[in-house]
Amino acid sequence: MVATQPPKIATTEPSTEEQSLFSLEDFMLHPPNHMEWIDGELVETTGMTVRHGTLQSRLSRFWGNHVDSQKLGGEVVTETACRTLNQGRRPDVAYMSPELVAQYGQAAGLPRSFPLIAEIASPDDSAEGLFAKAIEYLESGCQEVWLVFPEARIVLAKTAETAWQLFNPGDAIATQTTLQGFSIPLDELLA
């Protein structure tokens, strides 16, 4: 087996030439930090705030605690690369089933979507872009997606088989297909 060296990536935003030389396969083998591979180019993920990071950490902890307490196996990960049909993404929070951990637990990225994904809206995100990303995940094997809108204090959730569900303050949000039995009051998540 021939060892491959990671492509050279600039420490600042990559040049157009560097972006065009970096393939999706390169991205999946050596995903650069804070980057996604979108429409043939490396794109820096930006706009994350303290609030975004807090919610990302909190949701990761809540999902992880449920996995541990229910002895479900698998892992909850943050900003870990995955491949959709045509893109290389880094979901904010995702769950890997025990089977995926056994098969890909040492890989640089997952060659498919995670079964459960949450994207947390940051000030730079457009709602249209987040919905498109959610559909992309679902079309790539994801079973359930949550879109968390901290400023609006809502969460939208969708599975491959269901319509979008809206959760408002005072509601409890529950997983539908993955992490069976997980539920949390929206007010506690967005506290």
Image (cartoon, helix red, strand yellow):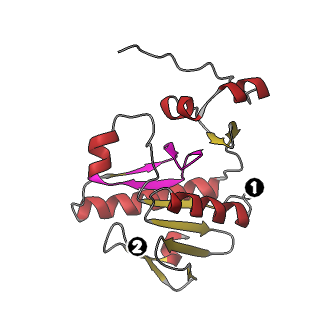
**Kind of element beneath mark 1:** loop
Asked whether residue 100 is in view, the answer is yes
User: Residue 62 falls in which quadrant of the image?
Assistant: bottom left
Could you say which is closer to the camera, residue 184 or residue 141? Answer: 141
Residue type for callout 1: Asp
Question: Where does residue 128 sit, x and y in percent of width and height?
Answer: 72, 65
Q: Which mark is residue 175?
A: 2
Asked whether the beta carbons under mark 2 and mark 1 sit within 8 Å of each other, the answer is no
User: Residue 123 falls in which quadrant of the image?
Assistant: bottom right
Above or below residue 184? Residue 130 is above
Residue type for callout 2: Thr
Asked whether residue 31 is in view, the answer is no
Relative horizontal placement of residue 121, taking residue 111 as reference (left or right): right
Relative horizontal placement of residue 38, taking residue 60 as reference (left or right): right
Relative horizontal placement of residue 112, taking residue 88 as reference (left or right): left
Above or below residue 45? Residue 17 is above
Q: What residue is rendered at 45% in x and 48% in y?
A: 112
Question: Where does residue 150 sit, x and y in percent of width and height?
Answer: 63, 68
Q: Residues within 10 Å of mark 1 (few under 14, many from 20)?
A: few
Question: Where does residue 159 sit, x and y in percent of width and height?
Answer: 47, 72
The span shown in magenta is 76-98
Q: Which residue is mark 1?
A: 124
